[in-house]
Amino acid sequence: TRLENNVVVISPFSNQQQVKLTGTVTDVSNNEPIVGAIVSVEGTTIGVQTDVNGRFTINLPKSNAVIKVTFLGYLPQVITLKGQTRIDIKLTSEVKRLEEVVVVGYGTVRKKDLTGTVSSIKTEELVKTPSSNAIEAVEGKVSGVDIIKTSGSAGAGINITVRGNRSINAGNNPLYIVDGIQYTNIQDVNPSDIASMEVLKDASTTAIYGSRGANGVVIITTKKGAEGKVKVTAGSYYGVSEVAGYPVPMNGSQFADLKRQAYRTNGIWNSTADDPKVFTSAAEIAAINNNTSTYWPGLLLHKGSQQDYVVGVSGGTDKTKVYFSFDYYKEEGVLNNDYSNRYTLRLNIDQSIFNTFKVGLESQLAYYDQNLRSDAILTVANKVIPYFTPYNTDGTLAKYPGNANQLNPLLEELPGAYVNQNNITRLLSTAYAEWKPLKGLVIRSNFGVVNSSTRNGHFEDANTITRALSTGSLSSITNTTQADLTWENIITYETKFDNHSLSLTGVTSYLSNRTDNSSASGTGQLLANQSFYALQNNPSNLSISSNYVGSNLQSGALRINYAFKDKYLFSFTGREDGASVLSPKNRWQFFPSAAVAWRVIDEQFMKDIPVISDFKVRASIGRAGNSAVKPYQTQSGLMLIPFAWNDQTALAYGLLPQIGNKDLKWELTTTKNLGFDFGVLKNRISGSIDIYDSKTKDLLYLQQLPPTSGGLSILNNIGKTRNSGLEIALRTVNFQTRNFSWISNITYTRNKERIEYLPNGNDVANNLIIGSPVNSFYDYKKIGIWQTADLTDATSYGYKPGDIRVLDINKDGKITAVDDRMVVGSAVPLYSVGFNNDFKFKNFDLNVFVFARVGQTFVSTYANKFEPNAIENGAVVDYWTPENPTNAYPRPDSKISRAALPFATTLGYKDGSFLKIRNIT
């Protein structure tokens, strides 16, 4: 009799033909029998359940079969038989998941010992959603994290905020740490290479990163090699994308009607007999009579695609462990010649020199070959008069179709007409050495290098959208190199005595950032096919420029974790940062935090409440900073200014519009957090609830200056913002039988974001309103269109039937910019919900992920595209006429442009709430 992995082997297999296996399934902690546990043979449909005594009998197809034992609330166990006829199996309660290790700043901690707020995502969750960016795959799966893709173009980036926006003039993206090193280009990391991703959200976990942690921290740990046989994994996918519900502009007859109504308003048109007064060219009248209509965006939009091919190899010995991967990802956008190719190589090596000393290397090489298009071409396509065609009678492209005002956007589709080529190479390499001289003591040194080289070649032919009204083509090339160095030393000491556990972590850190670039440009390229490769052949506007930016950050940190009886947990963190971007008097800043947790479930009185399987209370308070000051912003810069003197052109130096401020310092965010972790019914339902309140002061705010100061603006630490909210994460086991299971993960995030103080009150010019989110819309409130019956009231306000009607907030009988504007919406949602479902039936699995974002407002470019004078095409809208007294859009008017249309901006605000099936796999 022997014990193997909690499996008690009773007797050896004596007859190779014997296929019957008997045994028992019990709880490892109390030896109680588990009734209804499922014992099944992997790869088959064979399976049985244990009886009231936890016993089972199963017929095996072969003596070395692999069996799987599962039961709700317990960790599954897979056993490879070696000829046994009887086994006793002991299952471990799923509560033991709390023994899993979570990565935090400069170390790891067991889930059960966490005092802060950390969300952890494993590889299997990241790869369920096909995406070039691992962060995009997290959308809706982590409470408190808001993720938005910046556009639909190939290689588009991701905007992510953790617990709301704090800054106005500084960035709000979190700090990214990849294998211990700061790395901003998170899109380089192949999702299949990630072992785990942790999001640190409260101050007790982010303060260890000091001046970089106020916006949250995302820690990515990549895969390592493992001892044993070489393991090869491979995968690929191919997908097609297309624009769903692209807004269609007016067709030929619709636009002709708009133009007639615009002239009708001014008494010029009354019937089709007056068409010659409106449509002044024979080409227009012919096109209208022939019912010609061209859907211009349809000539530009195509189906896009994504494809990914990845191979991973891992293996090793007890001394050497290696992980290698290669990934090729290609995305083609919905516009012609809009593409992004990414090639990624990763090599991770861990080498033990002797028992107490090891070294390692984690390296990643990413290369991009991109040509990115601008969506300006679609904007023009929506404007082109629809009753004209793109071609001349000889089949060539017309520059201005039908002699209209809009350039033919198809000219930009010609080969070589528009080039925006990026070639990017980035290397992230981290070397480490780790020594364990004494029991519990670990000394580690990390040295990381990020090298980046980018070349952007740009060419626009003379007949492209932005150059049509300029003097010839535009050619430019920009080369940028970046070198970031990180050197960190971490000392960790852990010890236990009696009922006490103590962990000490000390950190020293040095970061160096260097970036330089050079660019050259010219106009009028003599040979268009030379594109941006022969700038010397541009006869006009040749210019060159170069730039250099450098900064350093030096830090020291200490963290103390203490536990009494493993149920009373305490944590203290302090970090001090010194930054070269600030003047010496403000260079250093201290960032403290403290947290406590109580594992209530471990108290004796909880033993009498068996329905509760886990319960922990957490509380924390701390301060983190936002390293938002750019290099040299404490100094005033000079620029060359040409001026005329005595009939001669001369050059002089003058101050840049934004003058320097030697008193600049960090933005500071203080966060309070109260959290609860719980599990009921043997963790059939488990999750966490967090309530937080974050206050940011010394906000970087761009203050306008009087002209007599010599500058236009200055950056100051004078604003305040606040974010408070609720986060809920739930895991529910809805069904679990021998052949079928359904497990759900639900997230709910509600954040209230607002500006609390600005030096001069509301900054309406920049939509910055006290009491509202940073990204708010401050405007008049459209309540409809003035109707014929409202003639008297409309006249009293200075308007007429058919004009946009807005709310008179103070009811003084007039509409003024000072008294009658309000916050009409915000780009941030009221709340968001993620609903992730994993179904398993025998050997098949299905994932369905539903995501909702509710309460945000967006400005619809399409809805705003209404030209009352019909000078160009626009949206298909319900506009006002005497026969159509709508409250949607105002009356067309040939004498008013959109720029002069009163309250035109109110037409674009739309409710951006949505519920979508994010993914089905």
Image: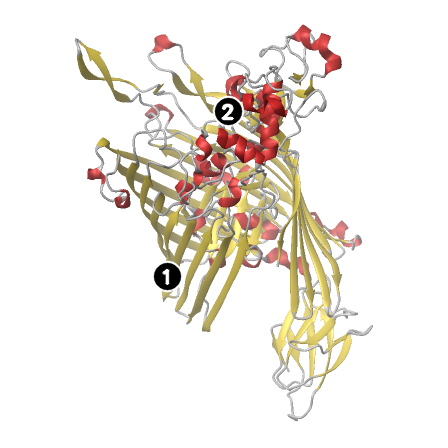
Query: What amino acid type should be assigned to the residue bearing mark 2?
Result: Thr
Closer to the chain start, of discs 1 and 2, is 2
Q: Is residue 501 left or right of residue 230?
A: right
Q: Nearer the viewer, mark 1 or mark 2?
A: 2
Q: In this view of the protein, can residue 437 be seen by the observer?
A: no
Please provide percent x and percent y for residue 204. 54, 39
Question: What residue is shown with label 2?
Answer: 280
Label 2, secondary structure: give it. loop
User: For residue 901, which numbered disc appears in the image?
Assistant: none
Mark 1 vs mark 2, CA separation in Å: 86 Å
Residue in the image at 61% along x and 52% along y: 112
Please provide percent x and percent y for residue 669. 52, 30
Please provide percent x and percent y for residue 607. 76, 54
Seen from the viewer's position, the closer of residues 876 and 521 is 876
For the C terminus, which image quadrant?
bottom right
Question: What residue is shown with label 1?
Answer: 357
Seen from the viewer's position, the closer of residues 515 and 919 is 919
For the N terminus, which image quadrant?
bottom right
Displayed quadrant of residue 407: top left
Is residue 594 shown above or below 46?
above
